[in-house]
Image: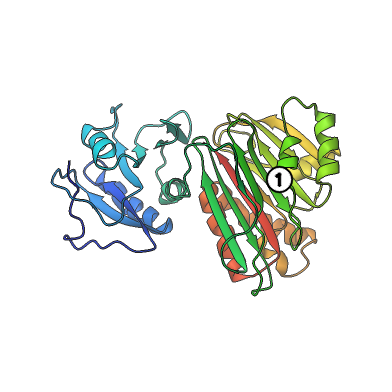
Amino acid sequence: MSHVDLVSAGIHESRIEEPVLVATHRIDPELLPDVQDACSKAHARYVPWSGETSMRELRKTPAVLVTGLRIGERRVPEDVLDLATNSYPDLSLLVLCREPLLRPTMSLNNGRVILVSPPLTSQRVASVLRSLLSDRQMGYASTDTATGHLGPKSPVNVRRYRRSDYWVGVLSSGRDERASARLPLVRQTKTDGLTVILPKPGMSTLLEVNAVAACFKRDRDGADRSASLEQGLGERGAALHLAPGADEWTVYWPHKHWPLFLSSPLRLPNVWNLCRSMERIGKNLIRFHAAHCDMIAALTCFPSASSGNPDSNTSLVASATALMPSLGEGGAALLDFLEQETRGQPVDLVGAVIEVF
């Protein structure tokens, strides 16, 4: 099958924005404005597709096709499957469902197909789009480690990752515009799972991510894990671990003034202040079951901590309140909010957002 001629139709691709195909004939007309708005929020190029079979290759291959399932439909339409199989074999599908699902979002086919349940708001669609447009590595090398450096010098640095069962975004910012803020360290392996280390802002020495990741192995008991992390990491930072299969969280958090939240539409309460809970029980290490739609937001401070007294209760409450709306919109939306806030008001901050599909 050849590719649709979108360029000759007057649709020009941006060198920055990723093109996103939208199956306009498969989505209810009243939803299309929200989808177009979602593409704008996700910094993506809205490219309408109405099922044409006369096609030719785009200059920039689209990464995502947005389509819909109407009430009563149970299969992805044949023309959509044909496009994703023959024309663009690496295309991810974002399927907007008109009937409620068991979860707000569901991942199929090793993360290539994402189903979104009502309500189909532009914010929710944009959040899923952002995760699909992130740096995607569906296979696993023996190890995939980000050392904490990122590109040119910048007061704010951001990096995103996506696997089949989770999404990760990391961010760092600094007051010094001449320096490059050091990102959290990220280690991802199929056998050991995901480890993210948040160093103290301004640290000049690199932490040993492999040694810290080894402390989270499942054959260690709680006391052994805690002692190993106290020795290997201490108060130089904090660490998050998501076990292989994304079924268990382990959090090492010795800094009780650093914000740490768990958000999920499937848990009660929907937002859990993990840091406060760990402070109450007097422990630096906590383990608990991970579930679909879990999202952890881990920060060394709130973005607004650069103004006023960051340790005052009034300031912390105000900062947490400002963060809450983004916690309900997904990891990608929250990371965008944090990036926007830190760019507008530079502060020494290191943060990570992890979302389980």
Q: Report the side of 116 relative to 163 (left or right).
A: left
Q: Which residue is drawn at 44% across and 35% down?
A: 111
Residue 298 place in picture, x, y as percent:
67, 49
**Of residues 317 and 18, which is closer to you in this image?**
18
In this view, 291 is above or below 284: above
**In this figure, what is the number of numbered marks?**
1
Residue 231 place in picture, x, y as percent:
86, 42
Tell me which colouring the rendered structure shows: rainbow
Q: Which residue is drawn at 64% across and 67% down?
A: 180
Task: Give the quadrant of residue 86.
Answer: top left
Task: Give the quadrant of residue 217.
Answer: top right
In this view, 169 is above or below 291: below
Q: What SS does tag 1 mark?
A: helix
In this view, 4 is above or below 89: below
10 Å neighbourhood of mark 1: few (<14), some, or many (≥20)? many
Residue that extends furthest to the left in the rendered view of this protein: 54
| Disc 1 target residue | 209
Residue 192 place in picture, x, y as percent:
64, 33
Q: Quadrant of the N terminus?
A: top left
Residue 197 place in picture, x, y as percent:
70, 47
Q: Report the side of 169 relative to 210 (left or right).
A: left
Amino acid of disc 1: Val
Q: Report the side of 104 relative to 71 (left or right).
A: right
In this view, 219 is above or below 132: above
Task: Give the quadrant of residue 176.
Answer: bottom right
Q: Which residue is drawn at 63% across and 31% down?
A: 290
